[in-house]
Image: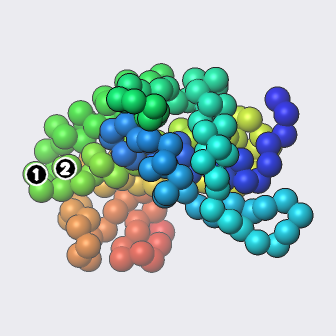
Amino acid sequence: MPSTSAATRILRDDLLAQLRSAQRPLTTAHLRGHAPAVPVAGTAVSCPPIQEQIYRVLCALERQGLVKRGSAPGREVTWLPAPNPADREIAALEATFTDSTTVQRADRPAIARASEHLSAGARCAHRIAIDGDDHTAAATLSHVLIHCADLLAHTTTLENLPAVNGGGGVVALRGNLIDNGSEVRQ
């Protein structure tokens, strides 16, 4: 696979994140309007991407099976994230979070939403890490997101500890106790 530029990697990551979090089809113009400025070759500045640049990246993502075209009236093209094999696992995890008896009803949608965002980010970062070196920012981001998802999963299944909801709760994670952000060895 040919090496991609930094601008293309930035756009690819951002476009996938926008599509995964939108929950609805987005147009190329909408995606461009929310895209970050990207480095311009030969200069020290970053500029907003042009429409064609966004479209080319979306077409490449479509060829890779990461996005698909939606239907829209007229000449507008809408884009959706492609179904992913991990989606079934994520749905099972969300069902587990929803059925958890240790989570208050008001917290369940927030936890499910956070889990979905963490999982989508981890999938995107993992896909990028597969395409490149294992010591990239994408690989590191993937590991961080997986760790956060583990933490989220542990907080919803603990029974004998106070709930973590911004108060002075305690969370058990891999043999350690974390109390108000400071780690305490057991």
Q: Nearer the viewer, residue 18 or 140?
A: 18
Location of the C terminus by quadrant is bottom left
Q: In the image, is 177 to the left or to the right of 33?
A: left
Disc 2/disc 1 C-alpha distance (Å):
5 Å
Q: Do the residues labelled 2 and 1 touch (CB within 8 Å)?
A: yes
Amino acid at dot 1: Arg
Give the quarter of the image for residue 92: top left
Is residue 167 visible in this depiction of the protein? yes
Write down the residue under mark 2: 108
Q: In the image, is 95 to the left or to the right of 13?
A: left
Does 15 appear above or below 34?
Answer: above
- Pinpoint residue 90: horizontal percent, then vertical percent: 37, 33
Q: Which of 70 and 148 is in front in this view?
A: 70
SS label for mark 2: helix
Write down the residue under mark 1: 105
Give the quarter of the image for residue 75: top left
- Label 2 environment density (alpha carbons within 10 Å; few <14, some 14–19, many ≥20): some
> What residue is shown at x 24% (from left), y 41% (from top)?
97
> What residue is shown at x 89% (from left), y 64% (from top)?
42
Q: In the image, is 152 to the left or to the right of 157?
A: right
> What residue is shown at x 58% (from left), y 27% (from top)?
62
Amino acid at dot 2: Arg
Q: Nearer the viewer, residue 19 or 145?
A: 19
- Pinpoint residue 84: horizontal percent, then vertical percent: 47, 26
Which label was assigned to residue 135?
A: none
